[in-house]
Amino acid sequence: MGRHSTLWKLLVPKYLDMMNCISLVCLLLCTGVSSFRFEELTQYVNSHEEEFIETLRQWIAVESDSSDVTKRSDLHRMMDMTAEKLRLIGGSVEMVDVGTQSLPNGSSIALPKVVTAQFGSDPSKRTVCVYGHVDVQPAKKEDGWATEPYELTDIDGNLYGRGASDNKAPVLAWIHTVEVYKALNIDLPVNVKFIIEGMEETGSNGLDDMIVAQKDSFFSDVDYTIISDCVWLSKRPALTYGTRGNCYFFAEVEGPKKDLHSGVYGGTVIEPMTDLIGILDKLISPSGKILIPGIREAVAHLSDDEWRMYQDIQFDLETYKQDVGMSQLMYTNKARQKTPVLKEQFLTVLNVKVDLLAHRWRHPTVSIHGIEGAFSSSGTKTVIPAKVIGKFSIRQVPNMDPAVVEKQVTDYLRSVFAKRNSPNKLNVTMVIGAKPWLADPKHPLYEAGKAAVKRGAALHIHTLQ
């Protein structure tokens, strides 16, 4: 989109307080701003700390869960709040209608509007477009939260709440940065645009079509796009030059015309749930190997430079285990298997850190997310479900094409299902097909980002104590 358009991801970690985020973003935009004025920027940020955090608190309180249609009104309210915040600081704001969402029962519901905003249109300046989202994943305290997920909570100087890191605080950090510049009457060194959506967590429904429709209008002058939606691996600042894509599948198995009582019909019918569990079990081996033919073979080889980069990354295995709450991880037993990675087609796992990180970032993975139609409440129920839908995804890496993966998965599951000789019906649907993205880490943008982050990390920035 536009002249020399390049995608650049700035990662903001969940443990970095929002004041640091705003100060860092100020620094990223401060080309041409004197050191004296930068001090002025940081002083303004620090003096408005409570105000900025209160705004985040209000945003966190909105249960903008895009996966739950019963909360769609909350999601619409979240988009309205985002648009209003951008208007209050002088942005030219539009709320773009992106249509409706089709539901499994055949009905439809309005998608949340996409918010666009613009600050400045000076043709002599570059134009930076900031992407973010304000929808969240589901969250309940009984899921394991130490605090109420929709109440922003300060614990030892860290702010916790559903959406705090993904992605409401990073979005607000960028908005507040523009606000700081305008409040101090400092000219923005670039034109700034925003595109904020409310369906990222469920596949960004409607966003692709909206971007294509506005490529010759809103996006026509965009030079650079910054995405503020990820985390750092450790407390060491990081810039991302690629992300895995995602193919999300529904595997639906349908049998009897209605749910049946297992005490009456059990043992006389071939149950859809049994079929579904059987085919899901064939997706991945206990050692983590993807069993779908063609998936692993498509993986691009890791370059020597990338191999060395993994070796140099700051990563503590024990801390990682503690964070995820697991005593053992995949690919950490050196004698376990030979893994198709890196320099040759097969390389014995010698470096646990590199191998684990490569599988986290650089290899396709299969994750099974849930089963719709099955009994999942507390207590007991002896039902035989008439129809169940297994939900799983495959993370894409370079050289993988969602269209090819869709065919590979569909053909494979059909062949597995056919071997069961079941009278039930199988339908496989890919509902999300997002391609992986990879940029050149040696691009001048990354060099500029690296320099800005290094300078920001060296500065004394006020933190929440």
Image: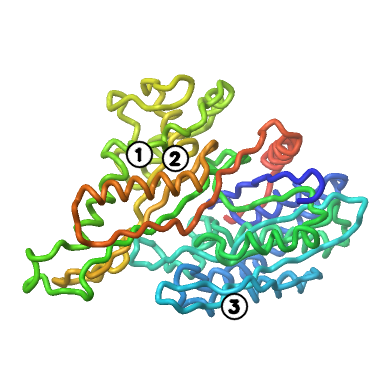
Name the element at disc 3: helix
- Say if residue 44 shows up in the picture: no
From the top left corner, tell me how far across and down residue 42 is, in percent: 75, 53
Along the line of sight, the residue nearer the viewer: 48 or 11? 11
On screen, residue 35 above or below 220:
above
Which residue sits at x=78%, y=62%? 218
Name the element at disc 2: loop
Between marks 3 and 2, how big is the CA–CA gap?
Answer: 36 Å
Along the line of sight, the residue nearer the viewer: 403 or 260? 403
Residues tagged 3 and 2 counted as in contact (Cβ below 8 A): no
From the top left corner, tell me how far across and down residue 6 is, in percent: 73, 44
Task: Tell me which numbered mark, 3 or 2, is placed earlier along the sequence.
Answer: 3
On screen, residue 77 above or below 421:
below
Task: Tell me which numbered mark, 2 or 1, is placed earlier along the sequence.
Answer: 1
Under mark 3, the amino acid is Arg
**Displayed quadrant of residue 273:** bottom left
Which residue sits at x=29%, y=46%? 415
Which residue sits at x=67%, y=40%? 457
From the top left corner, tell me how far across and down residue 47 is, in percent: 72, 62
Label disc, if present, on residue 169 of the rendered structure? none
Tag 2 residue: 364
User: Which residue is the extreme one toward the right?
Assistant: 124
Tag 3 residue: 77
On screen, residue 356 above or below 19:
above
Under mark 2, the amino acid is Pro
